[in-house]
Amino acid sequence: MAGVVSLFILNRNGSLIYSLETQGSSQLSSNDKIRLSSTFHGDDVSCISAIAAQISPVKRSGGPFSFLQTTGIRTLDADTFRLQCFHTATGVKIFCVMLPPYVDADILLRQVYSHYSDYVLKNPFYELDMPIRCEPFEKEVQRSLSEFQGR
Amino acid sequence: AGVMVIDLERWRQRHASQLIAEWIAMNARRRLWLHGSQPPLLLLFHDEVVSLHWSWNVDGLGHRLNYPKNVQRAWIYNFYTFGRGRKLLCREEWNRTRACRDIAEESKYVSGLLITLKSFAQQLGPPRTQAFLAYSTPQYKLHSFETISGYRFVLTTDPSVPDQQECLREIYEIFVEHVIKNPLYQLGDELEHCPVFKTKLHSFLMTRPFFASPFQSVVA
């Protein structure tokens, strides 16, 4: 069954704080997931998103609120999958891996962000930038994912 | 209606008018072709032509502007060719609004990024993932085509430009035809001995709908 197979959330420093994989994905070990996620992110120079911004041939368009427009990779296509990333204004990155036929996962990523704000950030016991271990959040994400797949 | 641009100096040097008159006379004696003026021109110049950008053809003399709207905005920024060992063989640029300060550094970034992306894709994706194809940011989109022999062809464009694997594949064929088969070219050199490759590359890219920029070539 095609569609979204895995979902990752990175904090502002590029560390993995949440991951979700369904049966279709490649079943990485947790070390691999951490390593790959920080390769994707980039505040320091050795990472993909940072270098992608460095080699950009286009100036960032100015105007009011231009600091809110994030650079960084939105989609990444390979021959067997697509990765789509949602960059939030606070530096949190939410990305998912999809198999063909590809759909636009923007809605799903935004929903996950909204669950993150509701169930994680408002949780008084959650420390910012730490791995997410909030049961309501995980339940809601599972629910959004199956609704999204069901379309 | 079509548009043709002629270099009159070279036309005169080649005595083209005379030769065309001879072809037409031959056609009058024995029917060689069916339609008007195009065939003798093709017979005379066959592959010494360069395609013009579609916007030369101002059909309706400017009062009718029914070009597809999305084509107006799309842009191409850069084209790179990398050989084995991350060596930059060819770099072309158009329309950049953010100048590149250091070409050597940029080429190191791009080639390193491609290698990282390829291994990232192979690890993250399902098994049997072979290649990374493209990524897009809000500012630009980068397309990459890698051959089995280790050459990489890279294109950076506006994010709205669709998938360009076919385009890069055709550029690879032009590359094989005019660079690899060129006896003066040593494998691994930069492409100075192959001006034909650059001309063919430009004329091919000018036929792409995303190439909306001042044109450079006319009939050779």
Image: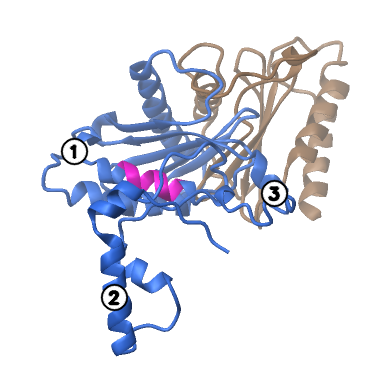
- Residue B193 marker: 1
Q: CA distance from mark 3 to mark 2?
A: 36 Å
Q: At 56% from the left edge and 12% from the top edge, which residue is drawn?
A: A43
**Is A60 part of what is drawn in magenta?**
no
- Looking at the picture, how far across and down is residue A46, in whole percent? 45, 16
Sequence order check: which comes first, mark 1 or mark 2? 2
Examine the rendered structure and indicate whether residue B160 appears above or below residue A63: below
- Residue B62 marker: 3
Specify the amino acid type for callout 2.
Trp
Pointer 1 with pointer 3, Cβ within 8 A: no
Give the chain ID for the brown colour: A
Q: CA distance from mark 1 to mark 2?
A: 35 Å
Left or right: B46 in relation to A58: left
> What SS does tag 3 mark?
loop
Magenta-highlighted residues:
B198-205
Badge 2 crowding class, 10 Å Cα cut-off, few under 14, some 14 to 19, many 20 or more, is some
Q: At 62% from the left edge and 37% from the top edge, which residue is drawn?
A: B159
Left or right: B167 in relation to B173: right
Specify the amino acid type for callout 3.
Gly
Q: CA distance from mark 1 to mark 3?
A: 41 Å
Specify the amino acid type for callout 1.
His
